[in-house]
Amino acid sequence: MNPTNKESLKEEKTLLLLALSFFTRVPVKFSHEITAAQLNNASRYFAVVGLFVGICCALIYTVSSAYLPKTVAVLLAMATSLLLTGAFHEDGWADTWDGFGGGWNIEQKLNIMKDSRLGTYGAAALFIILLLKFHSLMALASPVMALIVANTLSRVVATSLIYDMPYVALDSQSKVKPLAQELSQHSFLILLFTGLLVSLFYLSLTDCIVLFASLVIFRAVLRCWFNSQLGGYTGDCLGAAQQSSEIVIYLSLLLLGYGEIATNIGTFN
């Protein structure tokens, strides 16, 4: 391997570890200072981080479901996600609803979203999203498949918003700002390829097309919603996009016939 390729692989490894350290609580040490450009380029691996989170949740579900009721196994899988990510995306989901529900103008909304306190809108939205996750996973015949696919694809949807939406924030020192620089086409394609590869591993081509079509439509809805509220997106909006996309994926899988009832009917037939 020539020195150029070796350096390139080393840089990609750094970007992957950087993505892991940014979106999870997994401790990662770097031998050098990370630049804003590297943090921006790390976005290409956010779907890989989602795959990692999904696999961890699926493993916990698989082990616990062998000894415990499905309800407990699903709750443990959900708890694993919260512990791994530090409820990073759930926090964004709640802050987004607090801001959009309580603010009258863009500045007010952004100030509310920065507030660390949980408001009524955020609490209600958090309760609903967790309840939807639980019941969706309970209704699915294969929570393992659903956890892996949903955690991966939902991050593809959320990260893709960086590609064609402006970033808005009152705080120029925001943690997410380095990520908010325009997503390169190369990074965007890596992101899409990761999501497609994981989907095709578990689903048929037809089901993949239907699922991707539903996510493209939902992404357009999110884009319109964020633009109408803020004229762009914030880090909290990306968290909200990930959480809501995850639910859309679970519901889409149920509609595609991956639920327990549909599976049982197929077995009897």
Image: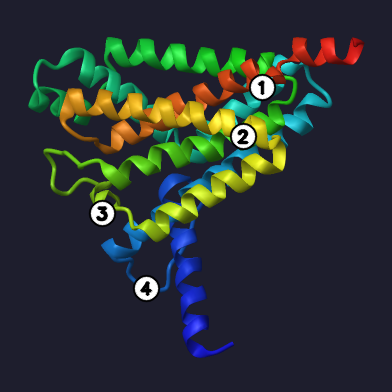
Confirm whether residue 11 shows in the render: yes
Classify residue 64 as left or right of residue 155.
right
Query: In the rendered structure, are the residues bearing label 2 and label 3 in contact, judged by CB atoms less than 8 Å apart?
Result: no
What distance separates the C-alpha of mark 1 from that of mark 2? 24 Å
Quadrant in the picture for residue 256: top right
Q: Which residue is mark 4?
A: 32
Residue ID at (31%, 47%): 163
Q: Earlier in the sequence, mark 4 or mark 1?
A: 4
Quadrant in the picture for residue 228: top left
Quadrant in the picture for residue 255: top right
134 to 249, vertically: above or below: above
Residue ID at (76%, 28%): 64
Q: Which residue is mark 2?
A: 208
What distance separates the C-alpha of mark 2 from that of mark 3? 32 Å
Where disc 2 sits, the SS reads helix
What distance separates the C-alpha of mark 2 from that of mark 4? 40 Å
Where disc 3 sits, the SS reads helix
Q: Residues within 10 Å of mark 2 (few under 14, many from 20)?
A: some
Classify residue 152 as left or right of residue 229.
right
From the image, which quarter does the N terminus lie in? bottom right
Q: Which residue is mark 3?
A: 178
Q: Which residue is mark 1?
A: 74
